[in-house]
Structure formats: structure tokens, C-alpha cells
Amino acid sequence: MPAEEKLPHYSDDLSKPFRLDTSTTYVDGGSGDRYWRDYLQLQCFPIDRFAPDWPAKPDAFSGGLAAYAVALQELAATVLELVAEGLGLDKSFFLGELIGGGTLMNVNWYPPCPDPSLTMGLVPHCDRPLLTVLSQGDVSGLQAKHRGRWIDVHPVPNAFVINLGHLMEIVTNGLLHSVEHRAVTNSSAARLSVVSIIMPEMDSRIEPLPALVSEEKPPKFRPFLFREFNEAYTAAAANREDVLRLFMIHPSDTIGSQN
Ligand code: OGA
Ligand code: NI
């Protein structure tokens, strides 16, 4: 779309259901760092509620997005059913308010960067919810932290990447870990990624699942409302350890390494 058509949508107001922006809205320790990223952020599910806020142009946008959002929601529900089954829980365990807060979508565009050593596409972070679903096209750039080292997560044709988020770590009392990830830039090819963030309801109460807590495995996290978490997450610039520590019962405990 020409710049003049896009311009009215630029905003850093997170409450807007559809907006364009650059870099990230995290206040990164006051460093003023900026990131090599343009993005479109929108609420994509439930469709009835949010489609009226989507732009009318280009013509194919709304129809394509609606179809994608429905299929995406089904995929996420299936994965969550499998995770619940794997944990020995009722299959539908995660399907209520923990995913009932609507789905937020980031469409990230990382233009070629003349000197990738000077900036990143996206700051290291963990996503907020139980899980996010990422489609990363065919250009590499996603990295995940594995045993203290950043490893490339190269695209697999026609496959999604599922990232477990902070809430999965908290509700499973640390059994499943949220994955810290970032996006790096490259100097030759632009990269597009589509990230769908399946949010809990703002008023849902989050705590380690009683079924996964015992005398030998006492709860590591205190109960809280997602609303509180959401504010803390933005303030802590999404940093994995800073965010988790705010909700730990014994903040001095070490936070499990990722594997
Ligand atoms: C995100 C994210 C990674 C990528 O938007 O939360 O982690 O590869 N994106 O664009
Ligand atoms: Ni992410």
C-alpha cells in the first residue's frame, strides 16, 4: 500500500485494535534502543468482534485474515489439547478462559539491514500466553535460547513454529518452560513473519495447576490476575527472568534453564 494510505494507521497506542508501528513498544531499560522492524498489530479473533476494525483495503485482506484466524484458532486448540493430554490432564483443560481473551496478531516485516551487527529485528523476549503460533516464511532470522546459547530456528516449509509462553511455564509450575527468542536481521533479504498470540481473559486467575502441585513440588508462583501480569510484562520489557521473578513465591530461587 502507498505510504499515504498507511500513515493514518501508525500509532503506539496499544489499545488500538489495528495499528502500524516500528521497533517495539517495550521500554528497554531506558536504553532507547530501536529495532529493525516494521509491524502491523491487530486483533484477529473473535472475528465478529474485531473485523469491523480491520481496514477495507487491500480488497483481499479481510477475507483472507478471517479464514486464517479461524484455522489458526483450531490449530492452537488442537496443540493445547495434546499438551493437556501429555500432562495427564483433561483434554479440554486449557480451552476455557486461558485462551478466551482473543487473539492478537503481529505481522512483522524486517527489511534488509545494511549492518546486522548494529541492531536486531526484535529484542530477546518470551511471549505472554500459553502459546503463540509463528509462521516465518522462508527467510531465517528467528533464534531461540537453548542451554544459554542462541540457536537458529530455520524455517521448515509449510510448518508453523509453536512457542510456549510465560503462562505455560507458570500454570505447569515450571514443568514446561517458556522459550526465550529473538529475531536477528540480515543484509540481503527482507523477512516477513506472522505471529498469533492466543491471549487469556484479562480477569482470568493464573496459578500453578493444583494437579501439578504437591508436597514435593510446592507451587513456585503465586496466584494473580492476567491483567496484572500484562502490565508487569510491558514494564519489564518482556525479559524472561525479570518477568517470572515478579510472580515467584521465592524470587531468589534460580529460574530453570531452557532446554
Ligand atoms: C514475536 C516474535 C519472531 C519473529 O513477534 O513475538 O517473536 O521471527 N517474532 O518474527
Ligand atoms: Ni515472540
Image: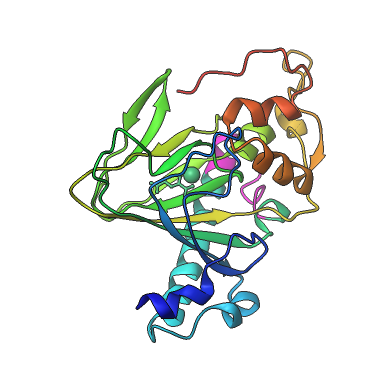
21 or 162: nearer the viewer: 21
* SS majority, magenta: loop
Q: Going by the image, does 145 lie left or right of 205? A: left
Number of marks drawn: 0
In which quadrant will I find the C terminus? top left
3 or 199: nearer the viewer: 3
Residue 223 vertical placement versus 57 (above, below) = above
- Magenta-drawn stretch contains 188: no
The answer to whether any part of residue 37 appears in the image is yes
Find residue 129 and report its horizontal and vertical position in percent: 61, 46
- Magenta-drawn stretch contains 94: yes
Residue at 66% x, 40% y is 233
Q: Going by the image, does 232 lie left or right of 175? A: right
Residue 202 figure quarter: bottom right
Residue at 69% x, 51% y is 98
Find residue 214 and report its horizontal and vertical position in percent: 76, 20
Find residue 8 and report its horizontal and vertical position in percent: 52, 76
103 or 175: nearer the viewer: 103
* Magenta stretch bounds: 83-95
The answer to whether any part of residue 175 appears in the image is no
Find residue 221 and report its horizontal and vertical position in percent: 75, 27
Q: Going by the image, does 2 lie left or right of 139? A: right
Residue at 61% x, 44% y is 128
229 or 31: nearer the viewer: 31
